[in-house]
């Protein structure tokens, strides 16, 4: 039996644990022990307790405000502890203790760069589980994540060097050699891109190994479709989703059979929008079941839900709320399998966008092309391949 540490540091809600849970089950079934370290304990209580797993709170830094939106991955790190070497060292010490107390043989990171840094100081191997966004390309400086805004290379280097200075100060504290580029923090035993090339947030990544998506955790019930004629629409939104009222208004006006999962929606708002054709559900929906039975989906552009819908050959209206989601939405729109709504621009009336998505067959056809391309790439095979790779890393074998 190997002791494995799942490390989740950045991000929110159910997507991180939900995506890793099928692999966690498979690892446990193979005789390994998974220690879960989570950024948010509420999703852990909701998802892990019923599975018989236990968890610990991850060491976290309070976001430090900076002017303007994040421009590079280094800019994100500077907002979460990497602007000050003492702050970063405190986080690394906490991660080191979690790794030592759990007897970790291998660290499995889910957007946890500080756990990667801590593992480096202990000489522990790391397997990165990245959706693309969470591991930048092997470039110096790290690329501009807002390619529609021109940035000078000097500005990109300044952001990288500020974060790199803190990283190298911490490495020196623990007797480790410095890094000459920030991407080398992610030069680990295995970089597992749990996505597809078409959905990689970084279009300029270059050659990489894509493992495919992890299977849906099958959490929740099948959607209770209204008994009405028309095309079925499944919406998974959040209260902070930009233009949420605009899309609810459009869904109400379209009169198509619609199921909406919007956790945190007030009873007053639910009463305002619900109708015989528009049903709100209070508990999570089985995303895979919803994707199979829907004609199209409306989401806030989370990778897990977006991928599940595309693998069923269904198009999407995407309402991202932050940069990571917007970059994914742009890739789906570039495939011609969906429509992305810019969160920084007024939404206006979304009925034309939904009508276009449903009535122009090219969107569905392009989603079906994506689904057909990966139809033979069974997700059970993805799990088996990952378990095998984890076991070879635990055995000290570096070759995939």
Image (cartoon, rainbow, N blue to C red):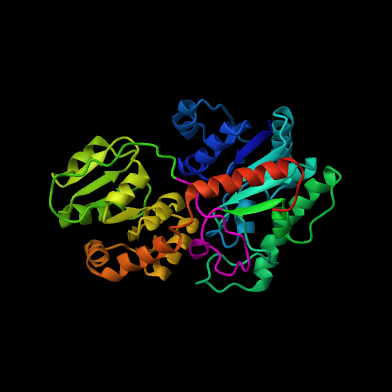
Compared with residue 356, is residue 262 higher up or lower down, i.e. above or below? Answer: above
Q: Is 326 in front, or is 221?
A: 221
Question: x, y percentage for residue 80?
Answer: 62, 47
Number of marks: 0
Looking at the picture, tell me which residue is in the foreground, 307 or 368: 368
In the displayed structure image, the side of residue 112 where residue 287 appears, left or right: left
Residue 315: x percent and y percent?
33, 61
Q: As drawn, which residue projects farthest toward the right?
A: 175
Residue at image x 54%, y 45%? 383
Q: Residue at x 73, y 53 (%)?
A: 399
The answer to whether residue 179 is visible is yes
Dominant secondary structure (helix, strand or loop) of the stretch shown in magenta: loop
Report whether residue 110 is seen: no
Quadrant (top left, top right, bottom left, bottom right) of the N terminus: top right
Q: Nearer the viewer, residue 366 or 283?
A: 366
Queried whether the magenta region covers residue 195, the answer comes back as yes
In the rendered view, does 97 fall on the left or right side of 199? Answer: right
* Horizontal side of residue 5 vs 284, given as left or right: right
Q: Is residue 396 magenta?
A: no
Image coordinates of residue 13 in percent, x first then y, are 46, 41
Q: Write the start and end of the magenta stretch as one range.
A: 194-215
Task: Name the residue rendered at 18%, 43% in the picture.
Answer: 274
Task: Name the spot of residue 251 as percent of width and height, x first.
Answer: 21, 54
């Amino acid at each position: 039996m190997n002791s494995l540490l799942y490390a989740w540091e950045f991000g929110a809600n159910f997507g991180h644990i939900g995506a890793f849970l099928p692999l966690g089950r498979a690892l446990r079934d193979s005789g390994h022990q998974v220690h879960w370290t989570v950024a948010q304990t509420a999703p852990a209580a909701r998802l892990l307790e019923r599975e018989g797993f236990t968890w610990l709170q991850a060491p976290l830094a309070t976001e430090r405000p900076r002017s303007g939106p994040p421009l590079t991955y280094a800019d994100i790190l500077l907002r979460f502890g990497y602007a000050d070497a003492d702050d970063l060292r405190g986080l690394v010490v906490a991660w080191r203790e979690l790794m030592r107390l759990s007897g970790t043989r291998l660290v499995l990171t889910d957007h946890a760069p500080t756990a990667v840094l801590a593992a480096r100081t202990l000489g522990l191997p790391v397997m990165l589980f990245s959706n693309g966004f969470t591991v930048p390309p092997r470039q110096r400086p790290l690329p501009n994540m807002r390619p529609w805004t021109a940035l000078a290379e000097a500005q990109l280097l300044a952001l990288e060097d500020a974060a790199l200075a803190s990283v190298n100060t911490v490495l020196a504290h623990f007797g480790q050699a410095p890094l000459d580029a920030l991407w080398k923090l992610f030069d680990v035993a295995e970089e597992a891109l749990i996505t597809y090339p078409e959905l990689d947030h970084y279009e300029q990544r270059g050659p990489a190994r894509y493992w495919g998506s992890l299977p849906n955790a099958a959490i929740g019930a099948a959607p209770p479709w209204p008994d009405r004629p028309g095309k079925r629409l499944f919406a998974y939104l959040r209260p902070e989703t930009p233009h949420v009222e605009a899309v609810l208004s459009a869904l109400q006006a379209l009169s198509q059979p619609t199921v909406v999962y919007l956790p945190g929606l007030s009873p007053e708002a639910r009463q305002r929008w619900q109708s015989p054709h528009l049903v709100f559900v209070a508990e999570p929906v089985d995303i895979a079941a919803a994707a199979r039975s829907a004609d199209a989906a409306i989401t806030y552009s989370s990778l897990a839900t977006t991928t599940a819908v595309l693998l069923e050959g269904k198009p999407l209206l995407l309402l991202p709320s932050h940069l990571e989601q917007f970059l994914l939405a742009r890739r789906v729109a570039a495939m011609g399998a969906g429509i992305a709504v810019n969160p920084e621009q007024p939404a206006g009336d979304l009925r034309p966008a939904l009508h276009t998505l449903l009535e122009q067959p090219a969107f569905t056809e392009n989603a079906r092309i994506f689904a057909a391309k990966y139809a033979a790439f069974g997700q059970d095979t993805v799990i088996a391949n990952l378990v095998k790779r984890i076991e070879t890393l635990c055995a000290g074998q570096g070759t995939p």
